[in-house]
Amino acid sequence: MKIQAIGKYVPENVLTNQDLEKIMDTSNDWIVSRTGIKKRHITTDDTTSSLAVKAAQNILNNSQIKATEIDFIIVATMTPDSHSPSVAAIVQSEIGANSVMAFDVSAACSGFVYALSIAEKMLQAESVEYGLVIGAETMSQTIDWSDRSTAVLFGDGAGGVIVKSSIESSLLAEDIHADGKKGNALVSGKIVNDAKTGNDKWRRSPLTMDGRDIYNFVVKEVPNSIRTVTKKANLELKDIDYFLLHQANERLIKQVSKKLALDSTKFPSNIAEYGNTSAASIPLLLAELVENQTIQLESGQKLLLSGFGGGLTWGSLVITI
Ligand code: 4VN
């Protein structure tokens, strides 16, 4: 597997911390000091599939590849438009790809890491040359806007890559996990039977999160995962050019860098602009770092991607780019 092209799309509409101060009991100072978030992009008319389609078109524009050359499409999302059709199937139709394999991956904030890992395995099949891998979310559709502990954290967006089969894989190592026993720490879209209330029988619940629980879990597990995957790649931490962590909380990212005794400049962040976009956060960050030339395709730079969140799931990849 080789990463051939990168792209993104975020909705234009911005919701600032000052905007939130007007609709809930919160403050810009609290949000910035606890999370690093200053604003988030929130869709007005877009859904997860339309964000994913626009990101796909941007990725294709950044490549020399035509939609008809793509051999599979994977979309990582925890906020699909529907369970059927999948977001990936909608993307397949909208970008004019052939009738190739298309499916969604449900691994919350780890989704993009899971999807890239799956893509690498699929590219080992002889008849497969190009794959489109996207992380796309409209977290705004699952947020409980009366819950100030979660409403301030999330945003919408999509990003992704085209991957190409190659004899020398740029995926050097992976370390991917789930611990379903801790699943209740982050729940979204749970099917609830409301028959007793006389309302419509079935509804899906908004996002609820035990923030402390997840935060502590991440501080414990993610440094281990980063060490493990680096070792599996026969590298040392100092050999990694950039650590692209899921953008869940800037303070948390600083804490992870500190635990690893690494300079925080090796942990780029764009959470100030987008908030937590779940499965879209790592590809959005990657796309921006390529846009501003911090990361250059074909440079041989070594990147460590690490996703973590609902499931609970977590996973790290070491790639060369
Ligand atoms: C991973 C993490 C989080 C997350 C958890 C807690 C949290 C983000 C709680 C304490 C609060 C500031 C905000 Cl670590 C979320 C996901 C889901 O993508 C994954 N923020 N906070 C404070 O300081 O009181």
Image: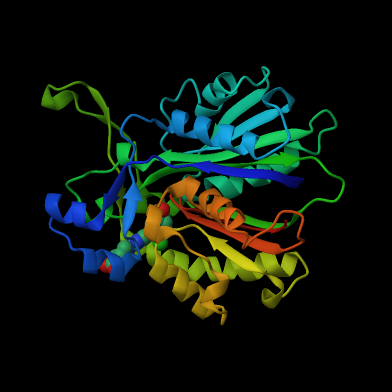
Q: Is residue 310 left or right of residue 228?
A: left
* Residue 81, image quadrant: top left
Q: Is residue 295 left or right of residue 178?
A: right
Q: Is residue 248 visible?
A: no
Q: Nearer the viewer, residue 3 or 210?
A: 3
Q: Quadrant of ligand 1?
A: bottom left
Q: Nearer the viewer, residue 9 or 195?
A: 9
Residue in view at x 45 percent, y 59 percent: 270
* Residue 122, image quadrant: top right
Q: Position of residue 236 (x, y in %)?
A: 72, 75
Residue in view at x 65 percent, y 21 percent: 97
Location of residue 38 with respect to 99 vertically, above or below:
below
Q: Position of residue 300 (x, y in %)?
A: 77, 61
> By what rule are the colours in the image chosen?
rainbow
Residue in view at x 39 percent, y 56 percent: 273
Q: Nearer the viewer, residue 249 or 269?
A: 269
